[in-house]
Image (spheres, grey):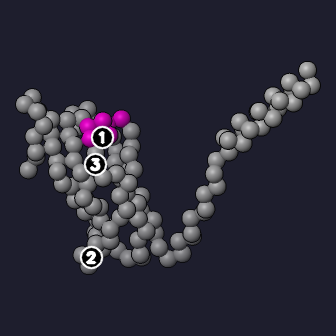
Amino acid sequence: MGQIRYNFIVLLLFLLAGCVPARTPPKPVLTDMGELIIYLQPLPQEAQRLRFAVEGIYAIKTDGSEIPLSLSVHELRGADLTGRQKLLATGTLPPGSYRGLSIRVKNAFVQSEEGERCSR
């Protein structure tokens, strides 16, 4: 009975050790920079007919200069657009004033009764 209990405990420890998450290094502290995180909110059910590629997302400063953000998603399909929020992009921004965002989309398609059509 003692050997079975010992084997069970060893097996349990191996299983639990495999469930420990890997340590990720902490992000550096942003002293004079800001972090921007962009999520796509769920769209209505009709959006399931859409498919498009995101070419880029940029933060636009008041002087018109663009700061590119890192894309998390390059193509979005109908099922991706409904249901839950989806992380689109992140970026670190220098201090200053901003006018808004620029989102460049390419290869946009809509599903119709005749099939998929390119939207221009």
Q: Nearer the viewer, mark 2 or mark 3?
A: 3
Tell me: 51 left or right of 13.
left
Instruction: Give the residue at mark 1.
Output: 81
Instruction: Give the residue at mark 2.
Output: 65
Q: Quadrant of residue 70?
A: bottom left
- Tell me what residue is drawn at x 50 percent, y 77 percent: 32
On screen, residue 111 above or below 99: above
Task: Give the mark, 3 or 1, whose residue is nearer the N terminus.
Answer: 3
Task: Give the mark, 2 or 1, whose residue is nearer the N terminus.
Answer: 2
Label 2 and label 3: CA atoms lie apart by: 25 Å
What's drawn in magenta, residue-wise?
77-83
Label 3 and label 1: CA atoms lie apart by: 11 Å
Q: Amino acid at mark 1?
A: Leu
Instruction: Give the residue at mark 3.
Output: 75
Residue 100 covered by magenta stretch: no
- Tell me what residue is drawn at x 10 percent, y 45 percent: 118
Label 2 and label 1: CA atoms lie apart by: 29 Å
> Can residue 5 be seen by looking at this rendering?
yes
On screen, residue 78 above or below 69: above
> Can residue 98 be seen by looking at this rendering?
no
